[in-house]
């Protein structure tokens, strides 16, 4: 049977020049924490889905066993994002199987204090 699951939706707001962090929490249909793999995760911000340039998002899997992934980008990376909007997603690779878990829009808010 083919898995026809589609990625979840989650939009991000990033304040340019600040360290970005966000937690993603995954639960089973009954509300229990989903046990997630602790390796194989990648995430990226791009200006458009077909852009070749992008900014990697670090995925911390320390709490993956509790269904939590922590996303982060250092301040120097968020400061270098030059467009006010973009797209992002997070994928898991298990062998040759690549699955996108969450995708969405990104809004970049320019900082005032530099």
Image: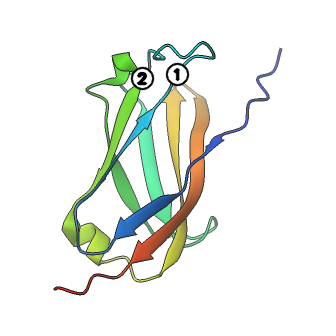
Query: Is 51 situated left or right of 68 in this image?
Result: right
Residue depicted at 52% across the width and 75% down the height? 85
According to the picture, the residue beneath numbered tag 2 turns out to be 67
Please give the name of the residue rendered at 49% of the width and 27% of the height, measured from the top-left corner. 26
Q: Against 39, is 14 above or below?
A: below
Q: Where is residue 9 in the image (x, y as percent from the top left)?
A: 62, 47
Circle 1 Cα neighbour tier, 10 Å, few/some/many (<14 / 14–19 / ≥20)? some
Whether tag 2 and tag 1 are in contact, CB under 8 A, the answer is yes
| Mark 2 closeness class: few <14, some 14–19, many ≥20 residues within 10 Å | some
* Residue 95 x %, y %: 52, 23
Residue at the image position 38 percent from the left and 29 percent from the top: 68
How far across and down, in percent of the image, does residue 47 sit? 53, 73
Task: Tell me the quadrant of the picture where the C terminus can be found.
Answer: bottom left
- Identify the mark nearer the N-term, 2 or 1: 1
Answer with the quarter of the image where residue 64 lies: top left
Q: Which residue is at the far front?
A: 31
Percent across and percent down for residue 67 are 42, 23
Q: How far apart are marks 2 and 1 (CA)?
A: 7 Å
- Residue 2 lies left or right of residue 74; in this view the side is right
Q: Which mark is residue 27?
A: 1
Which label is found at residue 66?
A: none
Q: Is residue 70 left or right of residue 91?
A: left
Quarter holding residue 15? bottom left
**Quadrant containing the N terminus in the rendered view:** top right
């Amino acid at each position: 049977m083919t898995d026809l699951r589609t990625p979840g939706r989650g939009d991000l707001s990033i304040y340019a020049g600040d360290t970005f962090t966000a937690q993603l929490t995954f639960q089973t249909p009954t509300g229990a924490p989903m046990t997630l793999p602790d390796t194989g995760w990648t995430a990226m911000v791009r200006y458009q889905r077909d852009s070749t340039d992008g900014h990697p998002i670090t995925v911390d899997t320390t709490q993956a066993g509790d269904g939590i992934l922590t996303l982060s980008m250092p301040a120097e990376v968020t400061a270098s994002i030059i467009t006010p909007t973009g797209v992002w997603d997070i994928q898991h690779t298990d062998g040759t199987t690549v699955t996108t878990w969450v995708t969405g829009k990104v809004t970049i808010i320019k900082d005032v204090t530099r």
